[in-house]
Amino acid sequence: MKLENTKAQMRKGLLDLCVLSIISKAEMYPSDVIKKLKELKMIVVEGTLYPLLNRLKNEELLSYHWKESNAGPPRKYYKITESGSSFLEELINTWKDLNTAVNKSIKQAEK
């Protein structure tokens, strides 16, 4: 098993949580989400985000609207829905539980 593949899969598994968290602060244009994910070192490839946004929209966790742009065609801006906020809260709780369990596991391995 290659380390880079495992690291990429770990990041990919947390993208829903990260994207919903980022968008929960304010409506966002996808390139802004990509920028934030890159700053966090959470995105593997840019093409990963667009299918993820579409899936979250189809699951009614995100919605979008079009805004006129001074630099070209209108842009699609995403925002979190009420059900998306509830879902995010559950993901955060799950992450906290998983983080605790993983940290305990790592501490046991270090002994």
Image (cartoon, helix red, strand yellow):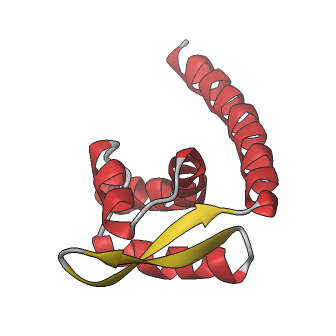
| Coordinates of residue 3 in the picture (x, y in percent) | 33, 54
**In this picture, is 66 found above or below 25?**
below
Residue in front for this viewpoint, 16 or 1: 16
> Can residue 2 be seen here?
no
**In this picture, is 91 found above or below 67?**
above
Q: Which residue sits at x=31%, y=47%?
A: 41
Q: Residue furthest top?
A: 111
| Coordinates of residue 45 in the picture (x, y in percent) | 29, 70
Residue in front for this viewpoint, 97 or 31: 31
**In this picture, is 48 found above or below 5?**
below
Q: Which residue sits at x=56%, y=25%?
A: 106
Instruction: Give the quadrant of residue 31.
Output: bottom left
| Coordinates of residue 37 in the picture (x, y in percent) | 36, 52
Q: Which residue sits at x=58%, y=17%?
A: 107
**In this picture, is 58 found above or below 95?**
below
Q: Residue furthest left?
A: 71
Q: Which residue sits at x=49%, y=54%?
A: 10
